[in-house]
Image (cartoon, grey):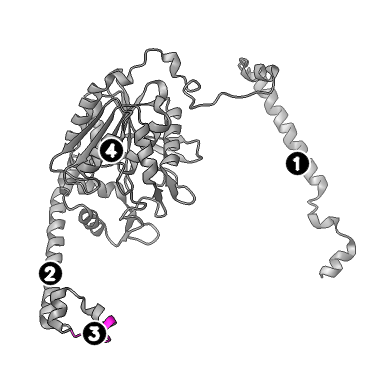
Amino acid sequence: MDHEADRGSGFDASAKGIFGGRRRRACPSDQRNASAARLNHAAKSERLLMELMAAQAKFEVARRPAPSKTFVDASTGLRLRVCEWKSAGDVEEANAVFLHGSCDQGSVWNDVCLRLCAKEAVQACYGPDMRGHGGSARSSSGRCDARVLAEDLRSLVVEKDLYRAPLMLVGEGEGACVAVRLAALCPQLVGSVVCINYAADVNVRPKHVMQGKHWSDRKYATLDVWSNDPKLEPEPVLQLVDLRVVEDIERGGCRTKMDPNWCFESKREERIHDFAAISCPLLLIRGEMSNMCTDEELESTQRMATKAPLCKIRVIKEHGEHLSVSCPGKLSRILTRWLQVTEDFYHVSDPESRRPELLNIRPLPEYGSVAEAMAALRPRAIPTPKMIADELAKLRADDEQSSDAESDVGYVTGLAKEPADYYGFVG
C-alpha cells in the first residue's frame, strides 16, 4: 500500500507504522494541515472567550435572587441540601419538586421556579441536590440507582410534610428517571410527572463527561463546558459553570463539584416497568436539538404508559439540553399550562386521609403491651424549674460516682489478668 492510498483510505499513519512495520515520515502538507487546525482551534477558543467576557458583565447584573437552602436527614442516612422557592401570596396550588441531572444541582431550576412562584402557579418549589452533588452528602461507594435516589426523595417528602397533597414531579435526565420510579412506587404521593429529555429507551450514562475533571484556570473550565454543548448561548454557559465548577483548594485551579466516584445505574427493563406502572398524568418534553432522546423514543414511551390517564409530548424548538437555563421562560409557560390542565389531580377532598401513616410512608410505632403503649403515648407533664434542677443534680451525682470508680480501678489494663511469669517471658 503506497502513501497516497493510505491518505485516501483514511488509514492513520501511526497505525500503519504499528501494523506495517515502519512509520512513514509526515509530509509538509500534513504539517501544514495540523498547523492550520491548531490555529483554527486557537482562534475559535479566543472568539469564545471574547463572547464569554462580553456576557460576563451582563450575567452579573442580571443574576437572579438565590433560593433559600435547608437540609434534610434522609432515612437512607445521608443529609440532603434542598433549594426552596415560595409564592408571595397565600395560594392553594400544588407543590412541585424539581430533580436535576448528573453534574448539576437543585439551583439549576432557579429561573424556572422564580417564574412559577411569581405567577403563583404553585404554592412552593423544591429542588434537592442529588446525593454526591451540590451541598448534599456523598455515599461511601458513589454507586446508586433510581430506587435509592427515589428513597432519598420519599424521605424529603416526609420531612417537609409535602404528602398533604399530590405533587408535580419535574425531572431532567437522571432526575426524570428518579421521578418516574417514585411515581411507580408511591403513586399516592404524585399528581403528575414531567420528564425532560428522557425516555424509556434512553441510554442512561453511568458517569458524566465532566466528572472528576480538573482545570488550571476557570476560563478553561468554561471553554470545556461550552464545548460539551456548543449550541448554548454564553449566559447559560456561565450559569452552568457556576453550578458545576468550584475552586480546588488542594491542587489549585478548579474542578467539578460533583462526587468523582458517583455512578448511576439503570436497567432498561426497570425503566419500561416504571413507565408502564405510572397511574398519573405524564408530560414528555424534548429540546428539538437534543441528542439525549429522539421523537421516536418519546412516542414509544408514550405507548408504554398505558395506565396514565393523560400522556402528552411537547417539543421546544431551537433548543437542546439544559432547558432550565437555556429557555426558562418557555419551560415555565409549558409547566404553568400543564398545572392548569392537571389541576384536578392535586385536589384533596379529605385532608385526614393524607396522614403519612395512612399513606404508608411513615410506619406506625409498635409496642409489646397496652401498658407500654400508654406510657409512651400519654401526654407528658411540662417540666418545672424544680424538676429540671433535680434532674441536673442527679446527673452531677452520677458523674461524680463514675469518676470515683475510675480512680479506684487505677486504670488497670487487660494485661493484669496474666500471671507474673508472663511478663518475663514477653521481656
In the rendering, which numbered label is found on residue 301? Answer: 4
Residue 370 shows in this picture: yes
Front position among marks 1 and 4: 4
Q: Earlier in the sequence, mark 1 or mark 3?
A: 3
Q: Amino acid at mark 4?
A: Thr
Q: Earlier in the sequence, mark 1 or mark 2?
A: 2
In the rendering, which numbered label is found on residue 403? Answer: 1
Q: Secondary structure at mark 4?
A: helix
Q: Earlier in the sequence, mark 3 or mark 2?
A: 3
Percent across and percent down for residue 108 are: 28, 41
Q: CA distance from mark 1 to mark 4?
A: 68 Å
Mark 2, residue position: 39
**Which region shows up in magenta?**
19-25
Percent across and percent down for residue 60 are: 20, 44
Q: Secondary structure at mark 3?
A: loop
Question: Could you classify mark 2 by the number of other residues whose Cα lies within 10 Å: few (under 14), some (14-19), or many (20 or more)?
Answer: few
Q: Secondary structure at mark 1?
A: helix
Front position among marks 3 and 4: 4
